Amino acid sequence: MRPEPIAIAFANTRSSPRRDRIETLTLWRAWIDAWPSLGTAGRAVDVDGLAALRRDRDDVQLLLHSIAGGQQPRPEPTERLLDAARSTRTLELRWPGGHPVLAVPDDVTAATVIAQHLIHAALDLVLTGPPLAACQGRNCRKLFVATRPDRRWCDSAICGNRARVRAHDRRTAHAADSTGAAGPAQRGGGPTPSVDPAGDEAPPQARPAGGGNRRDPGRHTG
Ligand SMILES: [Zn+2]
């Protein structure tokens, strides 16, 4: 499974309203290390720089969600991103061992260098990238490339499974109401509940039936 483009991965670091996967410098460094060519600059980001990057991330996520939903984005966050993209870009590459590495010139901060790269990546995705979709999982904020029209979840094993659990519980509760039998506590053979709504950074592997970009909460797989 190919990883999502970096602009999507950046947006997805806010995987749910209460979960920020780059909340601390330790988390940030673990995240940026997935892109070795960005690691030198990324690891030089300080606390203030990370705070700015997290604001940029929120703006990028709003923009990409608008695109995924086929809606015009809110002006303020988009304008902030465009302002950052319009500022003079510093771009320096080094080639230690023949591999490209994003370098940080003396007169700018590491966070600025990284932010410019990520914001330009997001704008490039908006202008020339593949179609995007938003996960339909409850409270999930993740996006993905809409590789299939029937894909609904960032990760079928997480958000898809949670939806199946809820659907199973609803059916069980309904049956209990009808017959007077016990409710969801006697659930057996149904989907396995997952721990965290958007709690897995694992590559998406959606397989459920369902409706791609369509809102179709009544459908599920079991
Ligand atoms: Zn999801």
Image: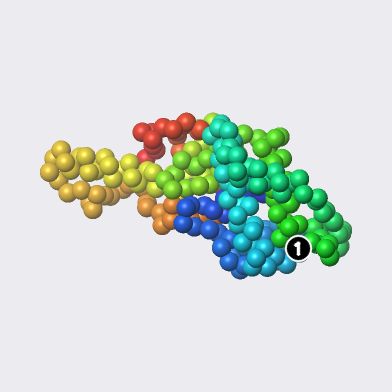
Q: Position of residue 34 (x, y in %)?
A: 67, 58
Between 128 and 222, the one lying in front of the other is: 128
Q: Would you identify the image quadrant in which residue 107 lies?
A: bottom right
Residue that appears at 61% across and 52% down: 57
Q: Is residue 110 above or below residue 62?
A: below
Q: Position of residue 67 (x, y in %)?
A: 59, 36
Q: Position of residue 214 (x, y in %)?
A: 47, 31
Mark 1, Cα crowd under 10 Å, few <14 / some 14-19 / many 20+, is some
Residue 121: in sight, yes or no? no
Q: Position of residue 204 (x, y in %)?
A: 55, 46
- 68 vs 211, left or right, is right
Residue that appears at 65% across and 43% down: 79
Residue that appears at 87% across and 59% down: 95
Q: Would you identify the image quadrant in which residue 102 lies?
A: bottom right
- Secondary structure of the residue carrying numbered label 1: loop
Between 189 and 155, the one lying in front of the other is: 155
**Label 1 sits on residue:** 109
Three-letter residue code for mark 1: Thr
The colour style of the image is rainbow
Where is the C terminus found, in terms of image quarters?
top left
Whether label 1 lies within 8 Å of ligand 1 gets the answer no
Residue that appears at 53% across and 47% down: 142
Residue 6: in sight, yes or no? yes
